[in-house]
Image (cartoon, rainbow, N blue to C red):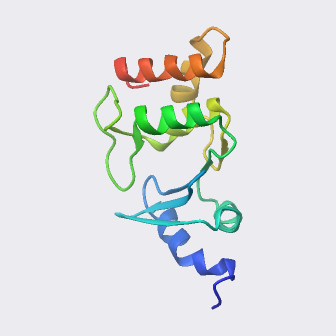
């Protein structure tokens, strides 16, 4: 298999599909494939994204999210639980939350969230918020999950 063959990711993606919370995250610094108790990182963003989507793997691509919002979510928000139970609520920056909860915040910030259906429990909290700039919505969400967990 050559380095430019997109199928070189197939085994890793298969393992991610078999892992609770397994997913692909893509940001300005490249991609990270979360699976088992491992991470695979690289810079072949669009190639692995296409393969992951075709396989049905959850994908969160935050490259189009304003930098300030992406940084706020990554630094202050909970992490997605991968191959582990989510932390007890409420969630903080060093806690693990269900992938659907993390995906809801990234979706609201403008990320391309694929193969993660909207979840009324997590996406629904945004319906309670007054309309406003995305940065205020993300601040509201962060305060909400710190107080209630979702």
Does 62 sit above or below residue 109? below
For residue 46, side relative to residue 30 (left or right): right
- Looking at the rendered image, the quarter that the C terminus falls into is top left
Toward which corner of the image does residue 96 lie, by quadrant?
A: top left
72 or 47, which lies in front? Answer: 72
Residue 104: percent from left, percent from top = 57, 33
- Write the residue at 59% across / 76% down: 10
Does 48 sit above or below residue 126? below
Residue 124: percent from left, percent from top = 57, 22
Does 21 sit above or below residue 106? below
- Write the residue at 43% across / 61% down: 19
Outermost residue toward the left in this view: 88
Decide if residue 52 is in sight here. yes
94 or 23, which lies in front? Answer: 94
Toward which corner of the image does residue 48 lie, by quadrant?
A: bottom right
Toward which corner of the image does residue 147 lie, by quadrant?
A: top left
């Amino acid at each position: 298999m050559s380095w430019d063959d997109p199928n070189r990711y197939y085994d890793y993606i298969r393992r991610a599909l078999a892992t609770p919370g397994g997913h692909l995250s893509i940001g300005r610094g490249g991609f990270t494939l979360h699976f088992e108790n491992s991470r695979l990182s690289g810079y072949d963003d669009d190639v692995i994204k296409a393969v992951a989507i075709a396989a049905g793997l959850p994908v969160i691509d935050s490259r189009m999210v304003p930098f300030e919002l992406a940084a706020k979510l990554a630094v202050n928000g909970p992490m997605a639980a991968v191959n582990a139970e989510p932390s007890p609520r409420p969630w903080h920056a060093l806690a693990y939350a269900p992938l659907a909860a993390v995906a809801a915040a990234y979706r609201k910030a403008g990320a391309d969230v694929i193969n993660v259906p909207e979840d009324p429990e997590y996406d629904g909290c945004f319906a309670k918020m007054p309309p406003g700039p995305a940065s205020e919505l993300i601040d509201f969400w962060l305060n909400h999950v710190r107080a209630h967990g979702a």
